[in-house]
Image (cartoon, grey):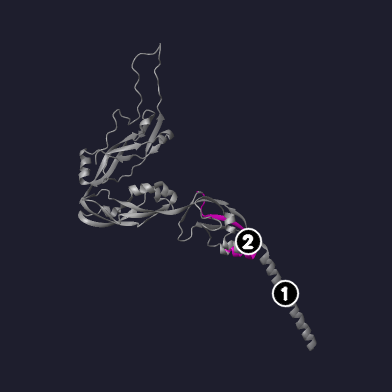
Amino acid sequence: MTPERREHVFAGIRHGVTITVVAVLVWLFAEAQSVSERTLDLRVRISTPTGSSWVIQTIDPAWSGVATVRVQGARVAVDDAVRLLTEGVDLMVGGPAVPAQRGRQVIDLREALLQNPPLDRAGVTIASVEPRTVEIEIDELVRIDDVPVRPLLPGVATVGEISAEPPTVTITAPSRAESRIGATLLETGVQARLPLSVLSSLPEGGPQEHEARIVLPDALSATPGASVDPATVTLTFTVRSTTERITQVSVPIWPQTPPTEINRWDIEVTPVVLRDVSLVGPSDVIQRIRSGDLRVIATLRLSSDELEQRITSKAPEIIGLPDTVAVESPIEPVTLQITPRIKTSAPTGEGAPNGPEPPATRAPGDDAEPAPRQPSR
């Protein structure tokens, strides 16, 4: 083959390879730019910046923290977006989607995700989001200083006072909760409780020191963002006597209504007594219960609203016991049947029957005598 012929062949090969490579590159570019669509379950975290005083509560009970997102765009862009969203996204309070202000807000998840940096830079379109919105409430945490500590040692009789160190704690709570119960907390304080394992093994005498946990009141225990500092205190006390237990075979249940409701309702309670109520407390107090000097009574306090609603069950409360006596048995709700009392009036004038009026119907537990005074502690 002549040199000219050889050069001509090589030139043809080079030309063919070049055309092939260009065609492949064009195909790859076209494939990358072709429209693609993906649906993914995206973890959406609505949170607050580290160190901020904001607290969030989700109002919508159906919100699980996961949104189903349908993403469209170039195949490469969609793949990049899916990769960036693998760990979920954070919608921060104070960001463009969640303004830092108190009160309820409805977040448009589609708009919020479009403003989020991973998707904002990916160059994709969010075709749909399910659910489309989520409702939240934003509040600001405030401090309640100098809340007194109230030591609680059920079943333990002590000599002298029980001291707590420190004697006060600081509670942090949403401003809405603080405005509702802040003043009450400063008056009633918070309880400091020992673990049951420690309570049951306290030796007599002292003084002795034990670490106790601060217990937030029910109104705060389930409130997002509520906390106490310090979480524990040291209690110093001297135990006077050991504890005893007693089981009350039968504790009567007395319905109790507001004075204005006494003659308006018939109340049937089932059962009418609590069975096998276990009590624990100092020996001298338990002895008073055993001898009958200290009566154990259960009351069923019914408000006007509960009567109007005709509730069908409620748990009674044990009354008349000192703070040193604890109820160990669970108090289960009893069944109620509340019916309006029918008022009857005797006819007047001629034809009116003679004889005494029939007695008024009384609700179970509505004795003629007033309820006994609470036994002294």
Label annotation for residue 20: 1
Q: Quadrant of residue 25 in the image?
A: bottom right
Q: Measured from the top left, where is residue 373 in percent x and y?
A: 27, 35
Is label 2 or label 1 in front? Answer: 2
* Label 2: few (<14), some (14–19) or many (≥20) C-alpha neighbours in 10 Å: many
Against 138, residue 117 (above or below) is below
Query: Where's the C terminus, which quadrant?
Result: top left
Q: Measured from the top left, where is residue 144 in percent x and y?
A: 38, 53
Badge 2 amino acid: Val
Q: Decide which of 8, 147 is in the foreground and name it.
A: 147
Q: Position of residue 260 (x, y in %)?
A: 37, 30
Please report the bounds of the magenta region as a residue range: 61-82
- Asked if residue 83 is positioned above or below residue 8 in the image, the reply reads above
On the question of residue 318 being in view, the answer is yes
Q: Residues within 10 Å of mark 1 (few under 14, many from 20)?
A: few
At 56% from the left and 51% from the top, the residue drawn is 133
Identify the image quadrant of residue 231: bottom left
Which residue sits at x=39%, y=49%? 182
Q: Is residue 70 left or right of residue 173?
A: right
What element does badge 1 sit on?
A: helix
Residue 344 vertical position relative to residue 110 in the rendered view, above or below? above
Q: Nearer the viewer, residue 318 or 159?
A: 159
Is residue 355 highlighted in magenta? no
Question: How far is disc 2 from disc 1 in space, using C-alphas?
Answer: 31 Å
Q: Which residue is mark 2?
A: 124
